[in-house]
Image (cartoon, rainbow, N blue to C red):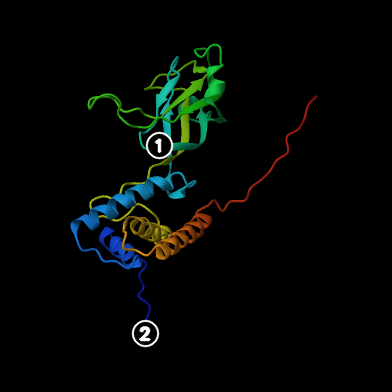
Amino acid sequence: MAYTSDTTSFNPNLNEIFEEAFERCGLEIRTGYDFRTARRSLNFMLTEWANRGINLWTVEQGSVNLVQGQTTYDLPIDTVDLLEHVIRTDSGQGPNQTDLNITRISVSTYSTIPNKLAQGRPIQVWVNRQSGQKVGSEAAVPKYPQINVWPCPDQGTAQQPYYIFYYWRLKRIYDAGDGTNVIDIPFRFLNCMVAGLAYMIAVKKPEVDPQRVAGLKMTYDEAWQLAADEDREKAPIRFVPREMFY
């Protein structure tokens, strides 16, 4: 009698992923350059995925201690964007701790605030999505993504904050690495990743038939759609009508 494997640990390393992608193109990895070009294409594809929507496995919670009179604060350098954010009062300690909504505003709205140094409980935030790259010289400080809150906090220090900015962010997917590691994606996206990599490799290889390239692109789009449709919140959505007062 045959039995199941009783394992759910399939998680291929980069060598196996590259071999599978090349085989889908009708090719074989023969040189070290084939490996390097596949790794480079994979890194480009992973950065492109940040533009395709919300990748739930990259959501991470963080916090920033707000300081009296300070408007601008750095976020982690690998931040893509913020999804949600609240202001937690009373240092997040004790029974008086409360999470209060803080509204995200655009740079146009923030720029028109007359007194950006007015103090109070912050109720608005502008997210300044910097590049994270160094500018000028090797010793330059990277341009961190930042938040600008308004009004300025009216109490608290970095060591003993009264207001804490809690956020849920999208972070960058980890790079492909050196070939000995596995990729930072859930198993549900493995086939999508290989399909996309096969298409990107085929585009660079002149010996691949154009019709096959078109077929690989279609396969990649279908695989992405399947994975993206599943990678979503399963909680029900509630729409609450707002009362109108005249």
Q: Give the class, few, some or many, for how many residues have Cα within 10 Å of label 2's Cα (few <14, many ≥20).
A: few
Q: Residue furthest left?
A: 32
Q: What is the x, y in percent for residue 42?
A: 33, 52
Measuring from the top left, give residue 207's x and y in whole percent.
Answer: 31, 63
Cβ–Cβ under 8 Å for marks 2 and 1 = no
Q: Name the amino acid type tagged 1.
A: Thr
Q: Residue at x 47, y 57 (%)?
A: 224
Looking at the image, is mark 2 or mark 1 nearer the viewer?
A: 1
Spot occupied by residue 148 in the image (x, y as percentages of width and height): 47, 23
**Residue 12 visible:** no
Q: Viewed as shown, does residue 102 lie left or right of 170? A: right
181 or 136: nearer the eye? 136
Q: Amino acid at mark 2?
A: Ala
- Look at 35% across and 52% down and name the residue there: 184
Q: Gap between marks 2 and 1, in whole Å?
A: 48 Å
Q: Secondary structure at mark 2?
A: loop
Q: Which mark is residue 79?
A: 1
Q: Is residue 44 above or below residue 13?
A: above
Which residue is denoted by mark 2 in the rendering?
2
Q: Residues within 10 Å of mark 1 (few under 14, many from 20)?
A: many
Query: Which part of the image, by quadrant, shows the C terminus?
Result: top right
Identify which residue, 8 or 201, lies in the foreground: 201
Q: Quadrant of the N terminus?
A: bottom left
Vertical order, 62 against 224 (above or below): above
